Structures are given as structure tokens and as C-alpha cells.
Image (tube, rainbow, N blue to C red):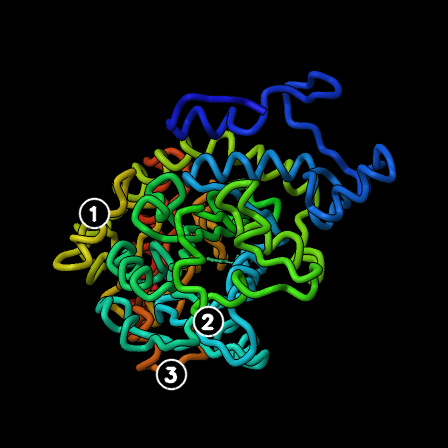
Amino acid sequence: MSDLDTTNPATLALHAGYRADPATNAVAVPIYQTTSYQFGSAEHAANLFSLSELGNIYTRIMNPTTDVLEQRITALEGGAAALAVSSGQTATAYAVQNLARAGDNIVSSTDLYGGTWNLFQNTLRQQGIEVRFVDPSRPENFAEASDERTRAYYAETLPNPKLEVFPIAEVAEIGRERGIPLIVDNTAAPILTRPLDHGAAVVVHSLTKYIGGHGTSIGGVIIDGGNFDWAAQPAQQPALNEPDPSYHGAVWTEAAAPLGPIAFALKARVTLLRDLGGALSPTNAFQIIQGLETLPLRIREHVKNASAVADFLASHPAVASVNYPRLQTGNAARRAHAYLRGGYGGLVGFELKDGFAAGQAFINALRLFYHVANIGDARSLAIHPASTTHSQLAADEQRDTGVTEGYVRLSVGIEHIDDIIADLSQALDAATSALSAAAE
Ligand code: PLP
């Protein structure tokens, strides 16, 4: 444990939650690759199982390597506790399932990662949880879609490919009046903004993206902000206020009270991880810690490079428009400035004047950028959504999600900016030549 008196992300990323291994004094966080932990005595075991004492029981539910990752992310996001899980998808699913049961609903922004859209539209619906999708550009839509069975609001800070920042404070406020917490997926904007500071109650991340950064390990995390009064309107949050038959009738807001404002995280750990088992492996926790230690440094480079790429593209004759939060106007710009205090992110979208064929020709000509569906890797990545991630959507649905025929999404990496721009420049030239040759 470290008792750091700082809020600086660059220091927290290296030091929060760990000083040296209590068993060996190892400075690097060790990989505790174990399934089980020997109990000190029969009484000790009984105390751990009854939650009257906290400690290691079984790696499906907790692990010392994973614990460091959880403490570090908690410090960086300014929360009260965190729960690391096997993927970003698991984090989203558990965050919702921790509150909503069959017959309940949540209200979600339409601007979502496709995997989350599928989870909400199909799998959760099949489990009896209705997801009501609303346009996030008008925060009142969340109020209008809510009723007495709405258990949460859900949104992404910086959804791609639209890249329009979500009105976190406005929607969090609407929810707080009604006893409804806002869950925010902050995968695209770690360090750049802390949704909990703006009123969100829970944050989720895919650790697979910027936080890992190396592209080696899938993981996810749920951060409990400790800033939401779950008991204020108990009828709105039965999962945390009614006796839980799976834990001898525990009422989570009461059971967690001696441990801190961590009812949400505690319940997710001891019920969902216990029952559904989407645990992060200790080796992946270690890998993600290696990435996390340099996250603040990398994010600075992502932002610097993406900003330069946006300016380069904006002045290129083959480009019709550029989408980067710093270059937006109106409400989108106001929100980008208000929330992305640490920089405007590493994602850039742009539309090629020559449409679908130009988009594909551009992607085929890239040499440095990888052609992948991922984001947030240290390497530069590109995709043409209309022919890949969004190809199953109808044209009007594509438009609603911010995708046009010639739209390209870049996740700008931390290579030298001259090499990034050189690759984009030659690929734009190659796409233009390929199209003119085809037209002749
Ligand atoms: N949230 C966002 C914004 C994402 O981009 C992704 C993955 O692309 C996920 C969640 C899901 O994360 P994972 O792939 O770790 O399950």
C-alpha cells in the first residue's frame, strides 16, 4: 500500500496502491498466479466468507496483483473502489446487471461502441432488461425516457466515430434528482477527463485500449465513484436496498457501510464475479499494470499527434471534412472544452471527398497505420467504417452513428509525428491516383 498525497496522474499511475511486495519487498508488482489462498484458521475462513473481515479467498473474486490494478485505477479516476474483470464488455454488462433485474430498464445514449449496442439491444433485452436508447445531444431525453423501473443511465464520454462528448454533468444531475446513477464508459478518454468529478456515479473502461496501450491483453474495470446515495430513493434501487437472498439477506447499502461508500463495487464483486465468473487473470492484470504506468505520458503524445493530424487533414485537398473535438462547433465544442480538460483525445475522423471507393483505396495504401477495428493502441490504427464495422447498417443508420461513405477513423499512435503524417500523405495521394486511373 502506498499513502500518496497527490492527485497528479503521472505519479499515481506509477505508485498508487503499491509500494513494495509485503512478502518479498519486490518493487515491481508481482504476478500472484494462484487460484487459492490458505486460510489462517477456521475462524479466519468464516470471517472472510461472512465479509466481517476482508481478505483473499479465491482468485475468481479477488487477487493481490489485480488488487493493485484496481487501486491504481480507483486513484486515477477519483473513485472509492474498483472491480477488474475479464474485458470491457464484462465491465459494461456487470455494471448494468448489478442494478437492473428482469422487468427493469436503463436509458442509454445512442452513441455507443457497436459491441455495447449489441449487448443492450439483444443480450440484455433477452434477459428481460429493457434498454431505452435516446439522443444524447438533448439531455432532457433521459428524463423523458425514465420511469420508476429505470435503474441507470448509460453513456460513453467520447463515443466514436461521432466523437461528440457526452453531457455528463447535465445527465448526471437529471438522474440524481430521480435516484438514477449515470454509468460512463471512459475508455476513449482516460486521464483526459474524470467523469466522477462531473457527477457520474460509476465509470467503466475497456483496459484493452489506452490503459494497456500495448495491445497484448483484454481486460475491463468498473469504478464505484462512492458519490451516489443509493439509499436516498430506495424504491428506485431495489438491488442495493432490498435483502439479497444470495447472501443471507444482506442489504448492500448497510453491509458495505463499515467498509466505505462501496456498496456498488462490493455487491458486484461478491455476487456477479462469484456467480458469473468473469475474472481478469493475474497475468493480464500484470500486463495492464505495465501499460498503466506510462498512460499519462502516452496520452500526452496521442493528443499531440492527433491534434497535428487533424490540422494536416483539414488543409488537405482530398479531405471534405475533419472530425476532431478541438475543431467542432456549437454545443459539441462547448462540451469538448468543458470536459476534455486534459486534451482532445487520440481519435480523429475525416471524410474523403471521393466517398466509399476513396475510403477503401486510402486504407489499402497505408503502410505505417495498421488496418484494425481496435482503438487506443500505442501504434497508429485506421479503419473505414462503411465497409467494415458499420457495413451491416442501412445508410440512414450509418448517418445517425456519424458514418458516411468516405469516412475514415484514425486512432493516432505515438510514433514520430513526421512518420504519421508522411504515411497519411502518401495514402491520400495513392487513393487520389487510384481513383483517377479507374475513372480514365
Ligand atoms: N467500450 C468501448 C468504447 C470500446 O471501444 C470497446 C472495445 O472496442 C469496449 C468497450 C469493449 O471492450 P473489450 O474489447 O475490452 O471487451
| Quadrant in which residue 152 is drawn | bottom left
> 89 and 427: which one is in front?
89
* Amino acid type at image mark 2: Trp
Q: Which residue is mark 2?
A: 117
SS at badge 3? loop
Q: Are marks 3 and 1 in contact (CB under 8 Å)?
A: no
SS at badge 1? helix
* Amino acid type at image mark 3: Ala
Q: Where, quadrant-wise, is the C terminus in this rendering?
A: bottom left
Q: Position of residue 247 (x, y in %)?
A: 69, 59
Q: CA distance from mark 2 to mark 3?
A: 15 Å
Residue density around tag 3, few if under 14, some if 14–19, many if 20 or more, within 10 Å: few
Q: Where, quadrant-wise, is the N terminus in this rendering?
A: top right
Is 34 located above or below residue 130 in the figure?
Answer: above
- In the image, what residue occupies the spot 48% across and 30% down? 13
Is 414 located above or below residue 8 in the figure?
Answer: below
Q: CA distance from mark 2 to mark 1?
A: 26 Å
Residue density around tag 1, few if under 14, some if 14–19, many if 20 or more, within 10 Å: few
In this rendering, does residue 220 appear at all? no
Q: Which residue extends farthest left?
A: 330
Q: Position of residue 112 (x, y in %)?
A: 40, 66
Q: Which residue extends farthest top?
A: 25
Q: Position of residue 183 (x, y in %)?
A: 42, 58
Q: Which residue is mark 1?
A: 338
> 254 and 314: which one is in front?
254
Q: Which residue is mark 3?
A: 394
